[in-house]
Image: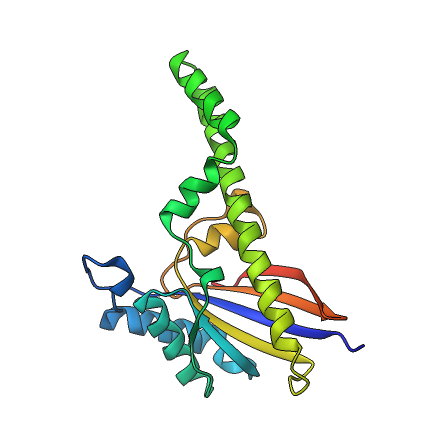
Amino acid sequence: METKVVEWYFIRHGEAAPNENDRARPLTETGKKEVANSVKEHLQTLNLNIVAAFHNGRRRAEETVEIALSLLGSQASPVYRQGFDFEVSDYDQAGSTYPEVLAEVQKQVKAGATETAGLWLSLWKGYKLAVLRGRLEQAICRESELITAESVIPSCSSVVVGSHGCFAELAAVDPKNCGMLTPGGIIKYTVEVSNGVASITSSEILC
């Protein structure tokens, strides 16, 4: 069976306006320009064959992918996917998976060993990111398998996703050097699907 490649482009939203409902915050004019400039510089010349587009349920992320699709000449419609929807509570909950690490942090702080506590805290953060990164990668592979199941899909396709800043930490090739994506920042995942099974072959921060 033919191996198909799906390239995923996660685009962080630009500057968003304040709103009591965080999920309803729209992009400001500055935010729209940040996204547009990033897409023009890093994606517009790639002639992407976009077969799907997703967002994480936040208005600013949906607007981000709408801007990208318009600039890339795609007729795809952005669709919400729970697999790409992460809240702060998810990050905190992931940390509870390793209570022994948190207990060690608290123990070292109580003993006054702040440097050691800091090392354990970094380890705890790494564990939390690993849990969420696993969730993200499962969602990417699952969607890639569904997309390539369609016989009309070409051998190399692209997907655009509007997201928020935490994806820089989740998707970074080297977690030690990761950080929040700048507004309009883009992360690329490359996925190969063979015999209906998807596997991630690479990920990189484009900007």
* Quadrant where the image shows the N terminus: bottom right
Residue depicted at x 42% and y 59%: 85
The percent position of residue 12, horizontal first and vertical second, equals: 40, 63
- How many badges with numbers are in the image? 0
The answer, for residue 36, to whether it is visible in the render is yes
The percent position of residue 113, horizontal first and vertical second, equals: 43, 15
- Above or below 19: residue 54: below
Nearer to us in this view, 151 or 43: 151
The percent position of residue 5, horizontal first and vertical second, equals: 67, 73
Nearer to us in this view, 155 or 203: 155
- Above or below 51: residue 104: above
Q: Is residue 160 found left or right of 164 in the rendered image?
A: right
Residue depicted at x 60% and y 65%: 142
The answer, for residue 172, to whether it is visible in the render is no
The percent position of residue 24, horizontal first and vertical second, equals: 25, 65
Residue depicted at x 43% and y 41%: 93
Residue depicted at x 51% and y 36%: 97
Quarter residue 39 falls in: bottom left
Quarter residue 50 falls in: bottom right
Q: Is residue 138 found left or right of 27 in the rendered image?
A: right
- Above or below 39: residue 95: above
Nearer to us in this view, 149 or 207: 149
